[in-house]
Image (cartoon, rainbow, N blue to C red):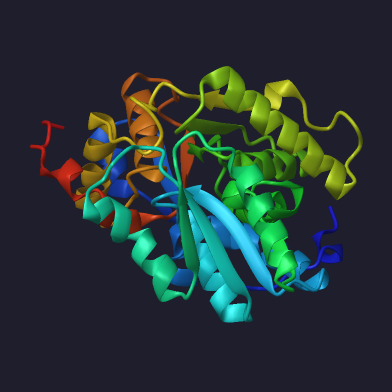
Amino acid sequence: MNLARFPRIRLGHGPTPLEPMENLTKRLGGPRLWIKRDDCTGLSTGGNKTRKLEYLMADARAQGADTVITQGATQSNHARQTAAACAKLGFRCHILLEDRTGYTDDAYRMSGNVLLDKLHGASVERRPGGADMQAEMEAVAERMRGEGKRPYVIPGGGSNPIGALGYVTAALELVNQAAEMGLKIDHLVHATGSAGTQAGLVAGLVGLNSGIPVLGIGVRAPREKQEANVLALAQRTADHLGLPPGTVRAEHVVANCDYVGQGYGIPTRGMVDAVRLVAETEGVLLDPVYSGKGMAGLIDLVRKGSFPEDSSVVFLHTGGAVGLFGYPDAFDLPAEAA
């Protein structure tokens, strides 16, 4: 895979650390747990979207855009990192935030990622839950064209074949790190939502013939829909890379969506306990929407014996801890005994 042929603007700190979670491993008594710290990508507190934006912003520049439009939920990590990338590169940024939770408190609507969106100079509009956000962005783009602007529209999560290249790059980075460390990775686990991270990882790891299976812990859609979304995007990404047809197949895409709870962005008991446990054992902050639920799934699966005790499992931390400030009430609950 020749990634150098795709335009890219370096925005992140990399390679991100790959670290053992020795205390969590000991606490759970299961397989050896590792963490890939994509919360350390550096752009506005970091996160997985920075990798995607390196390719998306390069494409925006190549197309002569002066304004970037994107969308996400109210506490969107993607929106925050897009706003920061625009600030760094001199683009205007316009964000549409969808109300997917119905929360009306000021902490959720105004702090955390929303505060940072505005600090980075983005203009923000809000939309009700269930809106056709792609159509809403296209309408805004048409309005801006009428004003003489040159907008570039990025889908939610940066999840298209261009954005997914960021996680093809991450797959290559991870394989190289593991080889240098003499680490055999038996499983790679992460939170999966808009599909771009998992699709890029699958396309990259399969294209490299790495033999590393990817498990996405779903945070939004039911399993069948999530796996279908990831498979479709992974195959489009493989095509974009020029890999042979049929390289990515259905068996390469696995999502476990048992840990979503009542819906996207709505806290669960497992998420709260996972955030607390990792903070208390490893000094690492997860986020309440993605990595917290992803880790809740991993912890539960370890406790159920889903991974051999002598295996090595890497958890990809997709960032977003600033979102904790949007959910203060979730952490007022007493902790369950570990």
Query: Which quadrant holds the C terminus?
Result: top left
Asked if 148 appears above or below 335 in the picture, the reply is below
Camera sees residue 42 = no
Residue 63: give x, y in percent of width and height: 82, 68
Residue 155: give x, y in percent of width and height: 64, 49
Nearest to the observer: residue 330 or residue 188: 330
- Rendering quarter of residue 277: top left
Residue 168: give x, y in percent of width and height: 70, 50
In this rendering, position of residue 249 left or right of residue 92: right
**What residue lies at 47% left-to-right and 31% top-to-bottom?**
220
Asked if 113 appears above or below 208 in the picture, the reply is below
Asked if 16 appears above or below 108 in the picture, the reply is below
- Rendering quarter of residue 209: top right
Residue 88: give x, y in percent of width and height: 57, 79
Residue lying furthest left: 334
In this rendering, position of residue 176 left or right of residue 235: left
Nearest to the observer: residue 289 or residue 116: 116
Count how many numbered circles sit on residues in the image: 0
Nearest to the observer: residue 53 or residue 335: 53
Camera sees residue 108 = yes
Nearest to the observer: residue 232 or residue 175: 232
In this rendering, position of residue 284 left or right of residue 73: left
